[in-house]
Amino acid sequence: MEITKNNYNRLWRWHFYAALFITPLLITLTLSGIGYLFYTNVENHFYKKNFFGNSGQTEQSTIDEGIKKATEAHKNYSVSKVIVLKDSYNTRLTMTRPDGDQKYVFLDQNYQIVGSQNAKYTFSNVMRNVHSSLFVGGTVVNYLVELAACWAIFLLLSGIYMTFRSHALKRMQNPNKRQKSLKWHALIGTIIAIPMIIVIFTGLPWSAFMGNFIYSAAQNKPSIGFPLLKQNPPISDMSEIPWATRKNETPESTSSHAGHHDMAGMEGMKHNSSMITVRQLMSEIDNHRISKPYSIIYPSGNNSVFTVSKSSNTGITGLDVSPYQEITTYFDPYSGKPISEVVYDDYGILAKWFTWGIPLHEGHLFGWMNKTLNFIVCLAFLLVIFWGFKTWLARKRKSLLSAPPVHSNKISIGFIAFMAILGMVMPLFGISLLVVVMIECLITWCKRGKGNKISLTN
């Protein structure tokens, strides 16, 4: 019984400190996650002119003439991607400057310029950057965000244990304010625990530490991940292609024209008369029966190829498709013929799982129901945080932190096993756990030293 009580007290203590330190991050991530859930609705409304409007010019141009006009209108920028959406949407060009700055330029049905956007400050990109890196970026911040997500899982699991161990849901006669807050905190936390854990885990493939680990496993183990296209680099920044193939090496062009032009990047290749036009490529795409919406990523070198893809997790309004429809096809830039292709059925179980998991996390896997469920879970999570702090404030003594006490240093095997499993499943959490253990040991050592000093004085 004593060991069980020690487990409860230690979990309560760690639950308390974790909540205290990561709650500001959790609130930020949850609010930005809610914003990202509805980015398509927001952008369809606020960017209506760019997305669906027209230039007012009736002259019909080709896609290549539209691209040329966009390049002339935006000096020092070159087109790196063409986003071909369904008929109701305008065509979107991603234009990139040598320093990495990007613009989105929209062409109407006549391929005339409608307008442009600064890519960094679109609603979807702002929400995504806040959600993933607090709009600051950098490895340390990315790790901090991931760490908050990992400790949130610990909070949910430890909360379930404490709820049932302390009978927090038991009906009470004349409960006080603290008991009422605790009951609501425990009840809502228990209800949303599993959905929230699913939401968090399906977002981890994009994380800095665990995300790279997952992707490396999928890349190195084709049987559970995805088939590698064993062709030559370089590759371009393919943020709109499927998660399962975005780091694959693109195949080389096999055309004899490739060896005759020593040029790097599309900025040089656009002057190459031997290369097919985007209009011709789109005709080949139609012949290959790739339907809209899809993205075209330009070649990045003289031996590189066009990459055409349909993805379930693009982050682009109007571009997402069902996981079953995912496809990444490579076209020769000179002949226009498809060289190789990766489809959903080629993925291993791990790649398939996250191909479903990411749109589930983003809230568009099964339409409005997915969006609504994610929204409810996020709101409930904010309420859990609110009632948790109300519970703490109700028991907090003035000028004191009022942290849960530790009655003993004894730790059960069950407790160690629980924390070890979480540490192995979430490596960054495991590393932070070692730091927490060292801090706990240091606090205990200081208390013992203080006690011995008092004893000697007496």
Image (cartoon, rainbow, N blue to C red):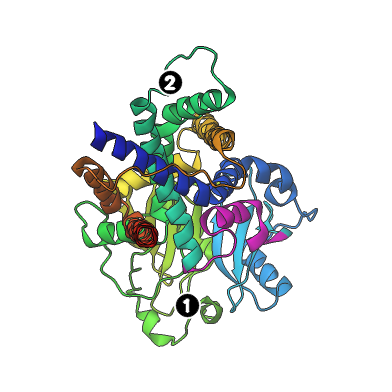
The amino acid type found where label 1 is placed reads Ser
Q: Residues within 10 Å of mark 2 (few under 14, many from 20)?
A: some
Please identify the residue farthest to the right as the structure is shown: 56
Residue at numbered disc 2:
169
| Direction from residue 20 to residue 107 in the image, left or right | right
Q: Are marks 1 and 2 in contact (CB under 8 Å)?
A: no
Q: Badge 1 local density, few (<14 within 10 Å), some, or many (20+)?
A: some
Q: Position of residue 170 (x, y in %)?
A: 42, 17
User: Residues in magenta?
Assistant: 116-139
In the rendered view, tell whether residue 376 sits above or below residue 105.
Answer: above
In this rendering, does residue 288 appear at all? Answer: no
| Nearer the observer, 290 or 322 | 322
Give SS at disc 2: loop
Picture residue at 39% right of the left edge, 68% below the top: 332
Please state which of residues 346 and 437 is positioned toward the viewer in this rendering. 437
- Image mark for residue 218: none
Q: CA distance from mark 1 to mark 2?
A: 73 Å
**Where is the N terminus found, in terms of image quarters?**
top left
* Relative image position of residue 277 (x, y in whole percent): 53, 68
Question: Dividing the picture into quarters, in which one does residue 445 lie?
Answer: bottom left
Asked where in the image residue 206 lies, by quadrant, the reply is bottom left
Residue at which label 1 appears: 274
Above-or-below relation of 363 to 255: above
Q: Give x and y (percent) for residue 241.
A: 44, 56
